[in-house]
Image: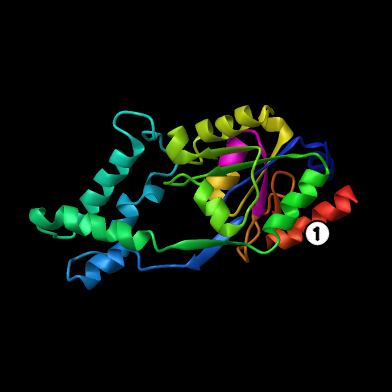
Amino acid sequence: MQIKERLYFAKAYIFDFYGTLVEIDNEPPQMWETLKNLGFDCHLSMQEMWESDGFDGCLTPSYDSTPSYQDWRKNNIFQLITQSGVPTERVNEIFIHLLEIEKQATKKAIPNANSIIRLLRAHNKKIGLCSNWDFPIQPYLEQAGLPLFDAVSVSAEVGARKPNAKIFADICTKLNVSPSESIFIGDHWFNDIAGAMRSELFPVWIRYDNPTCGMANHVLEFNTLSDFEKELELIFC
């Protein structure tokens, strides 16, 4: 089947969240910056070892497991804090402080995020969301003004982080479609595009000025979400 035919006949379009449909509206200092500003020996590389993104592709606890995802993430942040030289008696205090700063982050919809979903819905496509995300995602969807999705898979709920196949299988099951009937749209090459290909979904890469992958028969790529929407308009209209 030709690529444009695959887009036309696909039953479901599944989107990554951050970087694909939303971007930062307000970005507070990162944890490593706060620790450094407090006089502790922390660096970006240390945060990257212990933040959730450092475990991409892995299975993790879930919200409902024992220990829970929240316990797992707390332990990771505690490791970051203690390795930065925070005295034991201050670890919990600093942990609470870091979470308070983290809550200040806000997200907004990327231009064309809502209009591309409306276009797909107008052509009876199922719309899914599949994200590596630490928190219940609905408040962030409301914050960004995004619509309801037919199904949502969040890594903290599923217990698997993209590009792990488990989370791709989860969203397809919730949408009641096979991977071969699904299009996955994302901005992260490893998590979204490689993950989708490994899981037999057809990937669309929103590459934001990154060099082309040179795999035109396997990956459809656009510089922006707006460019992809224009292509869909041509295909459907």
Location of residue 147 with respect to 169 vertically, above or below: below
Q: Callout 1 environment at 10 Å: few (<14), some (14 to 19), or many (20+)?
A: few
> For this rendering, which residue is in front, 34 or 169?
34
| Residue 188 seen in this snapshot | no
Asked where in the image residue 62 lies, by quadrant, the reply is top left
Asked where in the image residue 221 lies, by quadrant, the reply is bottom right
> Which amino acid type is marked by label 1?
Lys
Q: Is residue 123 left or right of residue 51?
A: right
Asked if residue 200 is among those painted magenta in the image, a careful observer would answer: yes
Location of residue 174 with respect to 2 vertically, above or below: above
Asked if residue 89 is among those painted magenta in the image, a careful observer would answer: no
Q: Residue 231 in the image: x percent, y percent?
A: 81, 55
Q: How is the image coloured?
A: rainbow
Q: Residue 207 in the image: x percent, y percent?
A: 63, 59
Q: Is residue 102 left or right of residue 172?
A: left
Residue visible at 18% across and 60% down in the picture: 84
Where does label 1 land, which residue?
230
Q: Is residue 29 left or right of residue 108?
A: left
The span picked out in magenta is 195-205
Q: Is residue 45 left or right of residue 229?
A: left
> For this rendering, which residue is in front, 198 or 172?
172
| Residue 124 seen in this snapshot | yes
Q: Residue 198 in the image: x percent, y percent?
A: 58, 35
Q: Residue 192 in the image: x percent, y percent?
A: 57, 46
Location of residue 114 with respect to 165 vertically, above or below: below
Q: Secondary structure at mark 1?
A: helix
Q: Quadrant of the N terminus?
A: top right
Residue visible at 64% across and 45% down in the picture: 148
Residue visible at 35% across and 64% down in the picture: 30
The mark total stands at 1
In the image, farthest residue toward the right: 237
Residue visible at 43% across and 62% down in the picture: 105
